[in-house]
Amino acid sequence: MHATQFLSSPPNPIPPIIVMFGAEDHLKQQSLHLLQQILLGSDADAELSLSRYSGKEFDYATIRDELMTVSMFSSARIVLIDGADDFIKDYRAQLEDYFDRPSSRSTLVMIAKSWNKSTKLAKRLPKCGLEIDCGELPAGQLLQWLISQTQVLFEKQLSRDAAALMLQLAGTGMGLLTRELEKLAAYVGDRARIGVDDVRILVGGWKAETTWDMINAIRDGQPGVALSALDKLLNAGEAPQMILGGINFVFRKFAQATERARGGVTLSAALKQAQVFFRDIESSEQYLRRIGRQRAERLLTLLSQADAGLKGGSRISERIQLERLVLELSGSIPPKP
């Protein structure tokens, strides 16, 4: 079960063994908090029924004794092992026995970086417990999660374009994305909707704004302005792949619109269908007409070549690769064959 599913619909009853694994610490913290609320409640004595262990400064006998101890403060008890990878490896045989006969009064929660589902221990877990996958969501699911979280946590609507832009500017870390949502919700105040402009202003800081200046200058046929913005970003230490990501976000939509227009759709309608921001439709149409169909049909190729080059496929410096891409996209030089 993925953590997002657990958080929205936890099983009833909670099984006596929980294994959390994956790279998203935000999901681990949320899942653990929900477990505490369900099993222990939220009063002052609840924390007394939670025993925490981390690292390697304990053995299996210590954990076994904790699991078999009846709490004086609650009818339930949680024994938590954080960083449980070594514990699982060192005491696999003992844990296999415990999985066969777990305590009915305590819940064992093991939080690990990884969980090998091919082991005997993992194969025993479905009969007595639950695995909670706290790994990253695929891009499409993460986008939907972000929109849903905005509604659930802040009772506001996040447009799909705004959500996609957040992922581009802030990355895929769910903890960071939640903090950015908190800032956006406070920023828009009583407004019910968070839009693209709000994200542009608040997420990513001056580097994001400079990236947009560069992209707009490419689109508007101002290569000198675009190269100046690119120089500022690189000198400030912005990662070349991050810069390319911003370019991809916009120009892939132009490529999609070009392909749709080949099927007989008007260019304006094609840009709308490709989800180009409404206020940018006119300037985007002018851009595609300016560079011509032949170059427009090569946009995806140009972007793919740049991506491969920045990933080690070219001996040319990253700066020169990006400078050439800026000039190619703006129509200033012929594209590479």
Image (cartoon, helix red, strand yellow):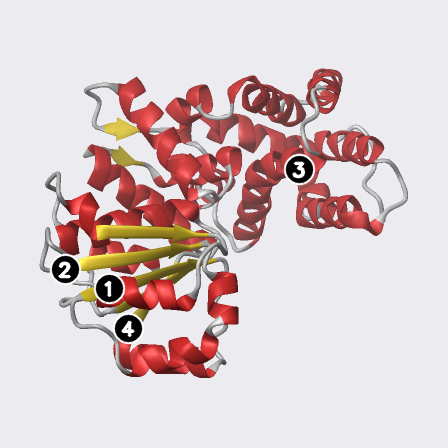
Cα distance, mark 4 to mark 1? 9 Å
Of marks 3 and 1, the one in the foreground: 1
Q: Is residue 295 above or below residue 75?
A: above
**Residue 65 spot, x, y in % from top left:** 29, 66
> Mark 2: which amino acid?
Ala
> Mark 4: which amino acid?
Gly
Cα distance, mark 2 to mark 3? 52 Å
- Helix, strand or loop at disc 2? loop
**Badge number at residue 181:** none
- Helix, strand or loop at disc 3? helix
> Mark 3: which amino acid?
Leu
Q: Residues within 10 Å of mark 4 (few under 14, many from 20)?
A: many
Cα distance, mark 3 to mark 1? 47 Å
User: Which tag, 1 or 2, sits closer to the chain's start?
Assistant: 2
Residue at the disc numbered 2:
76
**Residue 154 spot, x, y in % from top left:** 22, 33
Q: Does the residue at mark 1 contact the one at mark 2 (Cβ under 8 Å)? A: yes
Q: Residues within 10 Å of mark 3 (few under 14, many from 20)?
A: some
> Mark 1: which amino acid?
Thr
Residue at the disc numbered 3:
244
Residue at the disc numbered 1:
107
Nearer-the-camera pick, 3 or 315: 3
